[in-house]
Image (cartoon, rainbow, N blue to C red):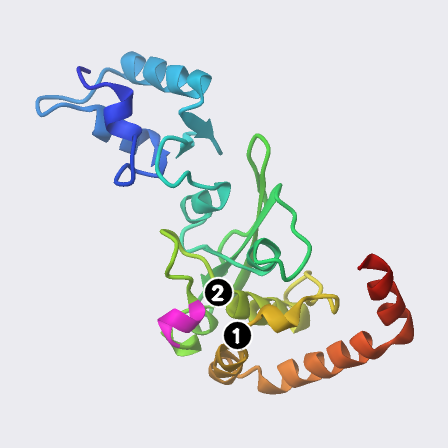
């Protein structure tokens, strides 16, 4: 392997999440793949130097890519079709409390086939997955720019979609997740986008009920007093 690690891993065009076969491919020359022992020795060196961050077995975050990837980018490699959503998206947007050691995602399923959604633990991150009907995650659920954050390089819901995903799962008898909390900064959401998605996902009535509960919560004297104390 004549190329230096920085030439392989560094920069805006570098791969951001890597599996062992992907690492073998980027390290190979035109003639042959690197020897197994050579490959794994190189991987161990990059982990030790901090260039590669281990996620699950055989899966790594490239810490030298720009901008630096987050653990959330590995979700789609751990569960095919996973879209980062729910608490992770809303927490990082400042709409709910943030739990940086947990990455939450939704995974599409078709009738008769439910994907594996068991949690997966990495060294310092837990990945949690929740299954939803594919019709609520593909183009039947709304325009791409309403559903998916196009500013990032992986599948990630917009905050408005994340809230509706959470609302759906909170009401589904097949889900164990509780619905979204009421102490959210809803004013940070894009109202027109939220309403468009609610129509496409057929969650208009559910959203109205939740918003009514949210208004009642915000007007509660005890809640208002606590909010003023925090200021």
* Residue 158, label in figure: 2
Q: Label the magenta part by its dominant secondary structure.
A: helix
| Residue 173 visible in the shown view | no
Residue 218: x and y in percent read 79, 75
Q: Is-magenta flag for residue 46?
A: no
Work out which quarter of the rendered image holds the C terminus and state it: bottom right
Residue 196: x and y in percent read 48, 82
Q: How many angstroms separate mark 2 from mark 1 (CA)?
A: 10 Å
Residue 53: x and y in percent read 46, 29
Q: Residue at x 29, y 40 (%)?
A: 12
* Residue 190, label in figure: 1
Location of residue 24 (image quadrant): top left
Give the answer, above or below, for where 66 lies relative to 181.
above
Q: Are marks 2 and 1 in contact (CB under 8 Å)?
A: yes
Q: Residue at x 42, y 49 (%)?
A: 76
Q: Nearer the viewer, residue 113 or 213?
A: 213
Tell me: 120 left or right of 170. left
Label 1 Cα crowd, 10 Å radius (few <14 / some 14-19 / many 20+): few
Label 2 Cα crowd, 10 Å radius (few <14 / some 14-19 / many 20+): many
Residue 116: x and y in percent read 51, 51
Q: Is-magenta flag for residue 144?
A: yes
What range of the chain is rendered magenta? 143-147
Tell me: 221 left or right of 148. right
Q: Nearer the viewer, residue 210 or 65?
A: 65
Tell me: 7 left or right of 111. left
Give the secondary structure at mark 2: loop
Among numbered discs 2 and 1, the one appearing first in the sequence: 2
């Amino acid at each position: 392997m004549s190329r230096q690690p920085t030439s392989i891993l560094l920069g805006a065009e570098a791969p951001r999440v890597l599996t062992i076969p992907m690492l073998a491919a980027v390290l190979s020359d035109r003639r042959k793949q690197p020897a197994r022992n050579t490959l794994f020795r190189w991987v161990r060196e990059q982990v030790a130097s901090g260039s590669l961050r281990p996620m699950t077995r055989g899966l790594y975050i490239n810490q030298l890519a720009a901008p630096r990837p987050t653990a959330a980018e590995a979700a789609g490699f751990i569960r095919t079709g996973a879209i980062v959503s729910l608490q992770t998206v809303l927490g990082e947007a400042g709409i709910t409390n943030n739990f940086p050691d947990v990455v939450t995602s939704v995974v599409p399923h078709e009738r008769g086939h439910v994907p594996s959604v068991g949690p997966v633990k990495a060294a310092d991150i837990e990945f949690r997955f929740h299954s939803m009907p594919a019709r609520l995650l593909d183009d039947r659920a709304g325009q791409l720019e309403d559903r998916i954050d196009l500013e990032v390089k992986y599948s990630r819901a917009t905050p408005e979609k994340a809230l509706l995903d959470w609302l759906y799962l909170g009401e589904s008898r097949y889900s164990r997740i509780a619905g979204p909390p009421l102490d959210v900064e809803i004013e940070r959401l894009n109202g027109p986008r939220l309403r468009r998605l609610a129509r496409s996902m057929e969650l208009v009535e559910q959203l109205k009920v939740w918003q009514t509960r949210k208004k009642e919560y915000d007007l509660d004297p005890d809640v208002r007093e606590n909010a003023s104390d925090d200021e």
